[in-house]
Amino acid sequence: MFNDTQRNYFKTLKTPFYYYDMEVLNQTLQQLKAAAPADYHIHYALKANANPEILQLIKHYGLGADCVSGNEVKRALETGFKPEEIVFAGVGKSDDEILLGLENDIFCFNVESSHELLVLNQLATQQGKTASIALRINPNVDAYTHKYITTGLEENKFGINPYELDDILSLLKTLKNIRLSGLHFHIGSQITSLTPYKNLCSRVNEINQFFIHKGLTVEHINLGGGLGINYKEPDTEAIVDFDAYFQVFKKFLALHPGQAVHFELGRSIVAQCGSLIARVLYIKNGITTNFAILDAGMTELIRPALYQAYHCIQSLEPAVSEERTRKYDVVGPICESSDCFGKAVVLPELKRGNLLAIRSAGAYGEVMSSRYNLRDETRSVYSQLGQINVGF
């Protein structure tokens, strides 16, 4: 992924920084658009990465926006996403966030509880608006992913359970400023098997039929996202198999005539275009463990500390013989023992000043960064067609 020009230029920059290969993102978006049937509506999940440069390119390809906070709605609007292409999800929307969506006439609120319905109706009534909503329904489908990023089981905080639906429908009849337009489902994140999506289709078909039998044919079905990437081999599989993903829904999803299909993809679009570039500060060689201490830490990429997530770590130094490799615990400078990017990572023998790339950091890297320990803000660097630009 990195050529000599890039590596040499990186050495002149203050580290750490996020590096985005915009050509990888461009190719990913091209393949996504080619694979998705023309009548499928794709919303990009801003929670994966809300960097304005990233959003501009995604918007250029005609994707909508999936937002889970008021500030994400603002960022989408500021970047040029049309209100009628913005979906607002989230289990705990504040009054101010709801009002922002109402004022801008966004496409849809994905509603997760009866209490939220009541609040949304009250605020819409006060504003003289009618809120278009989709009910986020918990399909109780196991995504077989990390427990912190599983969202479609009864034990999770998200969504409305099927046994609540009769009461929800009775409530909807009393809410004059709410318009039911869709059903929403999302079972989790970093899903690397297509089987959970097949299972999701079966449950969606059942739930959709339940609504149809009640005399309610919703306008759209939102199937969420969660498609995973290859963290172990980011160069050999830089772009996921979007064709296989969409084929599952074409084959197993049974729609009523006129119903539209929506998706909310995030990680699978942006993860592989991004890397966190860091410099070795110190080497601590022990009897059983060698530590490579970097100037980047969990403040720049929290996933390994939060989820025990794996990220490929590569040296950006000239290649050396295999006899000069060592195993390192690659750690950051933060005053937390969990501040570790990887254990027993085989790397060329390192020394102070060497550069490392922590790969697949385009999703849930920059957007989850923090100022813990009063760390400096981390800038971004972009390259496209050989040109490298530095942002702040």
Image: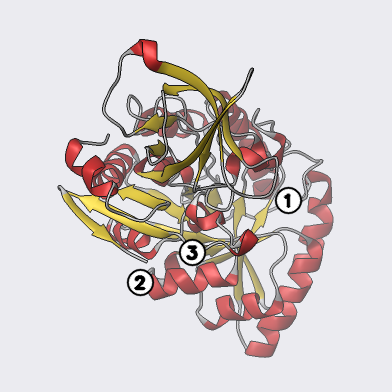
Where residue 49 sits: x, y (%)? 46, 55
Picture layout, residue 233 above or below residue 335? above
Q: Are marks 1 and 2 in contact (CB under 8 Å)?
A: no
Taking depth in this image into account, of 308 and 241 the one nearest to the observer is 308
Is 117 situated left or right of 108 in this image? right
Q: CA distance from mark 1 to mark 3?
A: 32 Å
Q: Quadrant of the C terminus?
A: bottom left
Is 10 situated left or right of 356 in this image? left
Q: CA distance from mark 2 to mark 3?
A: 25 Å
Q: Quadrant of the N terminus?
A: top left
Q: Which residue is mark 1?
A: 158
Q: Which of the 4 quarters of the picture holds residue 380?
A: bottom left
Q: How is the image coloured?
A: secondary structure
Where residue 322 sits: x, y (%)? 35, 12
1 or 3: mark nearer the eye: 3
Q: Which residue is mark 2?
A: 80
Where residue 390 sits: x, y (%)? 28, 61
Q: Which residue is mark 3?
A: 377
Mark 1 and mark 2 lie on one chain; the one further toward the N terminus is: 2
Q: CA distance from mark 1 to mark 2?
A: 29 Å
Judged from this view, the residue extending furthest toward the top is: 323
Could you say which disc has been placed on residue 31 in the image?
Answer: none
